[in-house]
């Protein structure tokens, strides 16, 4: 068989395969905790908006410690993806970041070893320690079996960003491990 026929055959067989959701390059997320919108961006262009996202019970700001119910502001990456979460899907953020570690070190909340572990994780592209006094397991997730009516009337998370199950499914087609996330 000549190369031209082999190429046509491979194109034909590829077109019969189901389409896979593959994250596009230059995709990043902007979560605005004031407007409660999550923008899916490609470069400077907004390609989709998910409205009425829910944040921590005590709002957004500087997260001081585990259990404070504050959604941390800052720049993160998607560090891990759990497709079988109790919240339907969970996209873990690389929280805490080096800036938060620096602040915590200056305030005496963490020691030098913890500070270096967070920085090393950041610069090596891995997940920072999730068991520090600053907390961890912060991410973007769905409702799972949770109440949509509760989601619609107040902020209910312990610091995460919550979406409806439909929204988290829609979001999942755009992101992958390493996707940039800005929470402002």
Image (cartoon, rainbow, N blue to C red):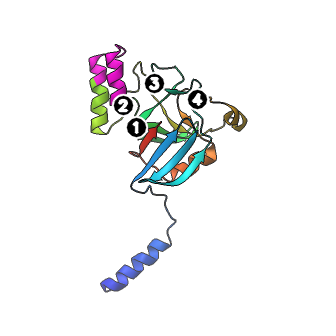
Task: Please name the residue that numbered disc 4 is placed on.
Answer: 157
Question: Which mark sits nearer the N-terminus, 2 or 3?
Answer: 3
* CA distance separating discs 4 and 3: 16 Å
Task: Please name the residue that numbered disc 1 is placed on.
Answer: 76
Question: Which mark sits nearer the N-terminus, 1 or 3?
Answer: 3
Q: Position of residue 177 (x, y in %)?
A: 40, 45
- SS type, badge 3: loop
Residue drawn 32% across the image and 18% down it: 105
* CA distance separating discs 4 and 2: 20 Å
The answer to which image quadrant residue 129 occupies is top left
> Which quadrant would the N terminus be assigned to in this image?
bottom left
Q: Is residue 76 above or below residue 109?
A: below
Q: Is residue 176 above or below residue 72?
A: below
State left or right for residue 27 relative to residue 155.
Answer: left
10 Å neighbourhood of mark 2: few (<14), some, or many (≥20)?
A: many
Question: Which mark sits nearer the N-terminus, 4 or 3?
Answer: 3
84 falls in the magenta region: no
Task: Please name the residue that numbered disc 2 is placed on.
Answer: 97
Q: Position of residue 83 (x, y in %)?
A: 52, 44
Task: Please name the residue that numbered disc 3 is placed on.
Answer: 62
* CA distance separating discs 1 and 4: 18 Å
Residues drawn in magenta:
97-115
Question: Which mark sits nearer the N-terminus, 1 or 4?
Answer: 1
Q: Position of residue 92 (x, y in %)?
A: 46, 37
The answer to which image quadrant residue 97 occupies is top left
10 Å neighbourhood of mark 1: few (<14), some, or many (≥20)?
A: many
* CA distance separating discs 1 and 3: 14 Å
In contact (CB < 8 Å): disc 1 and disc 2? yes
């Amino acid at each position: 068989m000549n190369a031209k026929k082999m190429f046509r055959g491979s194109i034909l067989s590829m077109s019969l395969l189901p389409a896979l959701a593959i994250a596009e390059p230059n995709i990043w997320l902007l979560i605005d905790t004031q407007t409660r919108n999550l923008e899916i961006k490609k470069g400077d262009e907004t390609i989709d908006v998910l409205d009425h996202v829910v944040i921590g019970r005590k709002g957004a700001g500087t997260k001081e410690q585990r259990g404070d119910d504050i959604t941390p502001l800052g720049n993160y990456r998607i560090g891990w993806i759990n497709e079988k979460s109790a919240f339907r899907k969970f996209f873990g953020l690389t929280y805490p970041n080096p800036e938060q570690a620096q602040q915590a070190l200056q305030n005496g909340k963490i020691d030098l070893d913890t500070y270096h572990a967070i920085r090393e994780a950041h610069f090596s592209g891995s997940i920072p320690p999730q068991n520090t006094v600053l907390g961890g397991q912060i991410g973007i997730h769905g409702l799972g079996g949770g109440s949509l009516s509760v989601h619609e009337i107040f902020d209910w998370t312990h610091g995460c960003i919550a979406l409806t199950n439909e929204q988290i499914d829609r979001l999942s087609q755009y992101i992958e491990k390493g996707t940039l996330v800005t929470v402002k």
